[in-house]
Every structure is written in structure tokens, then in C-alpha cells.
Image (cartoon, rainbow, N blue to C red):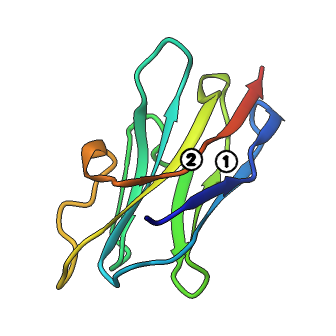
Amino acid sequence: QVQLMESGGGSVQAGGSLRLSCAASEYTTSDYCLGWFRQVPGKEREGVAAIDSDGRTTYADSVKGRFTISQDSSKNTQYLQMNSLKAEDTAMYYCAADFGDGPGYFDCSYREELDFGSWGQGTQVTVSS
């Protein structure tokens, strides 16, 4: 079972930036989909962004143009750079991963939450207005 550990959460004022990191214990295959999700108490978890092993990305409309997902396979780590933060970005952020059988990974998307088999414990992001 791949273990994921997030870091980088914290408190910031509206308009500020944070970078979240998610280190995986291993990448079990070279064909994978990595994602970030967030959840506010009392609401369903929502997808934020995803990136596949070929570098293709998808973003939720609410974060497009402000957030950037990336990954460094040499470090088994994915990142979420969050700029121009808003109060409504306040949430617990979770990273997730799915490792495919290859060749390639198809339909990697933040919309496909059920495809992700490995999850981190979450890191809190609080944006004050």
C-alpha cells in the first residue's frame, strides 16, 4: 500500500500563496494519476486538480488560473502551488494517487475521485479575508 504524506498547509491572508507537497512512499508503476482534493466540514469532498505521468493536467473551474499542480517523479512528490488565495479556498486538502498497469494512463482527472486508491491524511489550509 502506497503511503502519502502532505505538508505545507497553514494560515494565510486572502491574496496570498501556499505550496502544498505530497510525498509518496513509492511510485509502484511509471503510469499514474496524482490528484488534490479538498473538503470543508459538512460538505462533500471536491476535486481540485490532477496530473498524470505524461504531465497532462486538469483543474476545477474554481481554481483554474490560480492553482498549479506539478510532480517530481525523482522525489516521488507532487505539489500544489496555490496563488491568489480566497477565503472560500479554506479547507482540508488531501493528496491522492492511482497507479495503473500501463502503457500510459488514460482519463486522469480530478473528477474521478473513485479511481484514486491511495490517500494522504490531509493538511489544513485557512485563508482569512
Please give the residue where the numbered disc 1 appears in the rendered image: 83
Q: Horizontal and vertical percent for residue 60?
A: 38, 41
* Residue 31 vertical position relative to residue 46 in the rendered view, above or below: below
Q: Horizontal and vertical percent for residue 9?
A: 74, 44
Name which of mark 2 and mark 1 comes first in the sequence. 2
Q: Residue at x 35, y 77 (%)?
A: 53
Q: Secondary structure at mark 2?
A: loop
Kindly check if marks 2 and 1 are in contact, taking CB atoms under 8 A apart as contact.
yes
Q: Residue at x 74, y 49 (%)?
A: 18
Q: Horizontal and vertical percent for residue 10?
A: 80, 40
Name the quarter where the C terminus is drawn: top right
Between the C-alphas of marks 2 and 1, the distance is: 5 Å
Using a 10 Å C-alpha cutoff, classify the residue at mark 1 as few (fewer than 14 neighbours), some (14 to 19) or many (20 or more): some
The answer to whether 105 appears left or right of 83 in the picture is left
Q: Amino acid at mark 2?
A: Arg
Q: Residue at x 34, y 84 (%)?
A: 30
The answer to whether 126 appears left or right of 40 in the picture is right
Using a 10 Å C-alpha cutoff, classify the residue at mark 2 as few (fewer than 14 neighbours), some (14 to 19) or many (20 or more): some
* Residue 122 vertical position relative to residue 69 in the rendered view, above or below: above
Q: Secondary structure at mark 1?
A: loop
Q: Residue at x 74, y 28 (%)?
A: 127
Q: Which mark is residue 66?
A: 2
* Residue 45 vertical position relative to residue 23 in the rendered view, above or below: above
